[in-house]
Each structure stands twice: as structure tokens, then as C-alpha cells.
Amino acid sequence: MSGAAQDGPRRILIVTGMSGAGKTTALKTFEDLGWEVVDNLPLQLLDRLLGTPLPEGVDRSDRPLAIGIDSRTRGFDAEAIVRRIERLRADGTHDVAMLFLDCASAVLVRRFSETRRRHPLALDRPPADGIARERELTAALRASADHLIDTSETTSNVLQYQLRSTFGTGLEGGEPTLSIQSFGFSRGVPRTADLMFDMRFLRNPHWDDALRPLTGHDPAVSAYIAADPAYEEAISRIEELILLLLPRYASEGKSYVTIAFGCTGGRHRSVHVAERVAQRLRDAAFSPTVGHRDLVAGPRDSAREQPAVGGERQASGG
């Protein structure tokens, strides 16, 4: 047996999900992160792949493996895949997890229409037929997934950010991988947040004509938000809460923590607060990754504002 095969458990991630939900983007992201990536590998060849030694000098625990599997994979059988993963976990030589990328059916139909692609399970029928069939075929995988990402309201860039935040280190133990994100409630809440804080209680720069085109990165916007009487006490308490919780998360073995700050449009208040809190955490020796989901989106016209989830109308701006 090769020296590589004698090293610690190798991290393996099965990447699967609905066609059109972002598997290609995910695998490309893992490749950029330095993972070994194999797509559409027939299940019967998995043992051969895992038994092949890595290049000399490469520790199997240093280079994780991402395997793409979907309904197009030869011999696809969701329940058989789940059983195979269970056996791999049981033998103790592999650290195996599964990522399932999901998306609302209506969004998938639109994506296939916009790209003029045919659904792999409905080459001569409407995409909706293939999507419905694929949901049936992959139900067992979705139910068994360790990580579930819904890309219904997610751009390719945001998906890459989520994957990098969640899988970017591969380190075990120590401090959790910490991600801070700003977002706009008008475009939906992030589904991966562990802690979420609503900044809509702060004064809104959107209603100042001079500040509306700017963002939370601009000093004038930051000064406007910080002048709110409730600002300093509220944000300081939030920072204290986060600093209290992070060591507890680490002691419980949580590997990843995502903290989200939301305002209405995701361009002013949430951006400013996310940056402030990130700096406070850096000062406390943490290393957060910061992302702004809706910063590039233009402010919504108040004359065309949309009802929020649950029917409550939201004010415009950030």
C-alpha cells in the first residue's frame, strides 16, 4: 500500500442536486480552492478512484476530493449512493459529506428558458417535466445531505462566496471559520446564517437625496448612520454578544459560523454595520471573511416596492 494511503482520513464531498442549481459553479469553486474535482463519475468506479494513490508528496488529508454526481451520471441510483456513502463513513478511512444544491422549480424553468438549454431528463419535453422527475430521483440525496444550499435567489458570485466561506479551509479544530454578510430583506434572507441581526431600526440614508446613491462604504453614509441615538449602544451590545458566543461555538466543535446583518435594500445600514463588526472582530484576533450580497443591486423604486414574505410591505432603500 502506498504511503499516501496510510495517511489520515481524506475529506470527500459528494456534490449533487438539481440540474441548473449550480453544480458546475460549485465544482469550479472547489477546483479553485485546490480540491481534486471529478464530475459525473459512475458509482462503480468510485472504489478504483479512491484506491489510486495521490501524487508523491501529497498528503490525502491535505487535498480534499469533490465528486460531482447528478441524474446524468451513469448508473445513477440515489438510494445506492446514500448506502455507499454510509459504507465509506463506516470504514474510518474517509471523512465523507454530501452537498445538495436545490432551487425552486419555477426558477429552474426560467434558467433553462433563458439559457436555451434542454433539461437532461426532458430533452424532447418542457423543462418542468424533467425537473419534476429529477426531484423524485434525487429525493433520497436531499434528505441525507449534510449541507443544503438553495440557490433560488442566489447569483453565481454569491454561491461561490458561500462555498468558499463554508469549505474554504478544511481545517479541523481551532476557531470556527467566520463569515460576515450584509443583505437586503427586500430580496430575501440568507438561508445559511447562524446569527442574523435586523438593522432596520437605524435611520435610513435612503431618504436623504444626497446619500441615496452612495453605499455603506462611504464615510458620509457611515456618519449618518452612526448619528442615530440608538446606534452605538445597540451595535456595541451586538459585538459583545458575538464575542461571547464565538468561543462557545468553538468549544462545541462548530466549524463554520455565518453572521448576517440585514436592512431593507442591503446597500447602506447593513453594509456599514457588517464592516464595523468585522473590524471589531479583527481587533479581537478573529479573521472574518466579509461579503455584501446585495451591494451591487440598485435601490428599489418606492413606487414599485414589492410585498415582503408574509405580505408586509417594506420601505425602500438600505
Image (cartoon, rainbow, N blue to C red):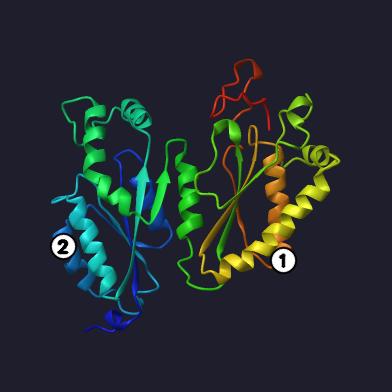
Question: What is the crowding at mark 2: few (fewer than 14 residues within 10 Å), some, or many (at least 20)?
Answer: few
Residue occupying image coordinates x 51% and y 65%: 254
Classify residue 281 by image quadrant.
bottom right
Vertical order, 141 against 230 (above or below): below
Taking depth in this image into account, of 56 and 228 the one nearest to the observer is: 228
What SS does tag 1 mark?
Answer: loop
Q: Position of residue 23 (x, y in %)?
A: 34, 46
In the displayed structure image, the side of residue 264 where residue 86 appears, left or right? left
Q: Residue furthest front?
A: 310
Residue occupying image coordinates x 74% and y 37%: 201
What residue is pinned by disc 1?
284
Residue 60 is labelled as: none
What SS does tag 2 mark?
Answer: helix
Looking at the rendered structure, the kind of residue marked 1 is: Ala
Classify residue 6 by image quadrant.
bottom left
Vertical order, 127 against 151 (above or below): above
Residue occupying image coordinates x 40% and y 54%: 147
Q: Position of residue 249 (x, y in %)?
A: 58, 65
Q: Nearer the viewer, mark 2 or mark 1?
A: 1
What residue is pinned by disc 2?
45
Q: Position of residue 125 (x, y in %)?
A: 18, 25
* Cα–Cα span, label 2 and label 1: 48 Å
Residue occupying image coordinates x 76% and y 37%: 202
Vertical order, 300 against 248 (above or below): above
Tell me if label 2 and label 1 are in contact, CB under 8 Å: no
Looking at the rendered structure, the kind of residue marked 2 is: Leu
Q: Quadrant of the C terminus?
A: top right
Q: Quadrant of the N terminus?
A: bottom left
Q: Position of residue 62 (x, y in %)?
A: 40, 73
